Amino acid sequence: MTDIFSAVDFYIEGLFAKEDEALAAAVADMKAAGMPEISVSPVLGRLLSVLAKAVRARRILEIGTLGGYSAIWLGRALPEEGRMLSLELDAQNAAVARTNLARAGLSGKVEVREGAALDILPRLIASGEPPFDFIFIDADKEPYLDYFELSLRLSKPGTMIVADNVIRHGAVIDPARAEIPAVAGVKRFSDALAAHPAVDATIIQTVGVKSHDGLALAVVREAR
């Protein structure tokens, strides 16, 4: 079944998500830098772009930049006056991302800020940062719930929050893998998301070149 899922992914990619020179170069640069191949696929990148446009995002927050691949997709969804802030813990990753974003012509729209998101997000809140229209969470999985709760405080009614990798190849329903930190982290997040009174949310199961995983989507009803 994996072969057919990947083949269909390539079919969708050919229709809607063909990589241009900047995206292909970003993938090559990340590989040359020894980064893990954990960026979103082209098809999921296109989905993020469509979702950001659907909510008419002018301000985007990304938690977890890696090499900037998803930031290119999201940055391109912004209108001319739009701006995006992407947070990255690793200085080398951030440097590669800035190069990739510059090649894509997005240096003026997308800022990559180095540091731990759990340190940066509270500072943004304390400084009165205006709310974001679209927030993408794709960082270390154990603190996903913390990222979500902080993201809510940087949101407004109508903000869309998307979190990647919440199915973990089905591990979230496997008792034998329940204590794996990343699995436990996304389960805590998903359980809280399902019961949270401030959002309307769901999870979409995904298959394709990135194997079996899922995206959580939430629309904020009331800011916290």
Image (cartoon, grey):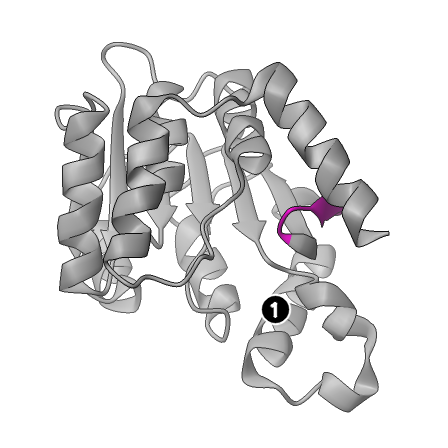
Q: Is residue 204 magenta?
A: yes
Q: Is residue 205 magenta?
A: yes
| Mark 1 residue crowding within 10 angstroms, few (<14) / some (14–19) / many (20+) | many
Q: Is residue 68 visible?
A: no
Front-lying residue, 71 or 223: 71
Q: Residue at x 73, y 59 (%)?
A: 195
Q: Is residue 76 above or below residue 9?
A: above
Q: Residue at x 35, y 31 (%)?
A: 23
Front-lying residue, 184 or 70: 70
Q: Is residue 107 visible?
A: yes
Front-lying residue, 141 or 194: 141
Query: What percent of the width, then of the height, locates residue 89?
Result: 23, 64
Q: Residue at x 15, y 30 (%)?
A: 102
Residue type, numbered disc 1: Val
Query: What percent of the width, then of the height, locates residue 78?
Result: 35, 18
Front-lying residue, 13 or 89: 13
Region of the chain picked out in magenta, as a range: 203-210
